[in-house]
Image: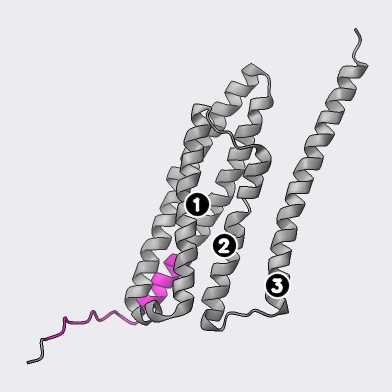
Amino acid sequence: MTLPLPLAVTWPPEAYLWFKTLHIVGVVVWFAGLFYLVRLFIYHREAAELDPPLRQAFEDQYGLMERRLANIITTPGMAVAVAMAVGLLLVEPIWLKQAWMHAKLGFVAGLLAYHWFCYRLMGQLQRGECHWSGRQLRALNELPTLLLVLVVMLVVFKNRFPTGAATWFLVALVVFMAASIQFYARWRRLRSERLAQQESGGAPA
């Protein structure tokens, strides 16, 4: 005796396109929020070097900006991206059997963990308990860039993921950009310190 199978859901022809459109919008909003959120963390952390009256004002302002960005833009973007991704998988369940999708879901899990970690850092900053330096936060801010490149390549190439010279060039370019940002931040900080020393040395006794 053959048991009857559950009825398959019949999706309208345009469902895939709607899910895909909203998924792309959600991803763009999510990543924009992630990139700027950690940048605010950097400014928030470096505000600790200011004089006490200015420091409190800047820390309060950055804390407010962080909460609004995280709760009004970044997290809703993440929710839309994930919800529409579920819709796409319901329309195309065959993707769940393909290796590229397994890899993509792994990277997405990493992004969700990164999103949660950003909330943890935000709470630490607002309580004055964050021990991350501005330099470490700048390095952290490059992680979603690398994940974004890998996810986009998986979506485009799927099971034909390239491993040739072009791929390695792209990875090297991302690493070079991240290193350049770190070196520029270090140069700017050293320059500011040198100018401050010159001003204090040239001030009248």
- Residue found 63% across the figure and 54% down from its top: 142
- Residue named by callout 2: 147
Distance in Å between CA atoms under marks 1 and 3: 24 Å
- Residue named by callout 3: 168
- Residue found 68% across the figure and 23% down from its top: 50
Q: Number of labelled discs?
A: 3
The spot of residue 87 in percent (x, y) is: 34, 70
3 or 2: tag closer to the N-terminus: 2
Residue 26 is left or right of residue 170, and the answer is left
Q: Secondary structure at mark 2?
A: helix
- Residue found 46% across the figure and 42% down from its top: 119
Residue closest to the eye, 54 or 160: 160
In the rendered view of the protein, which quadrant contains the N terminus? bottom left
**Amino acid bearing label 1:** Tyr
1 or 3: tag closer to the N-terminus: 1
Height in image: 116 above or below 193? below
Q: Secondary structure at mark 3?
A: helix
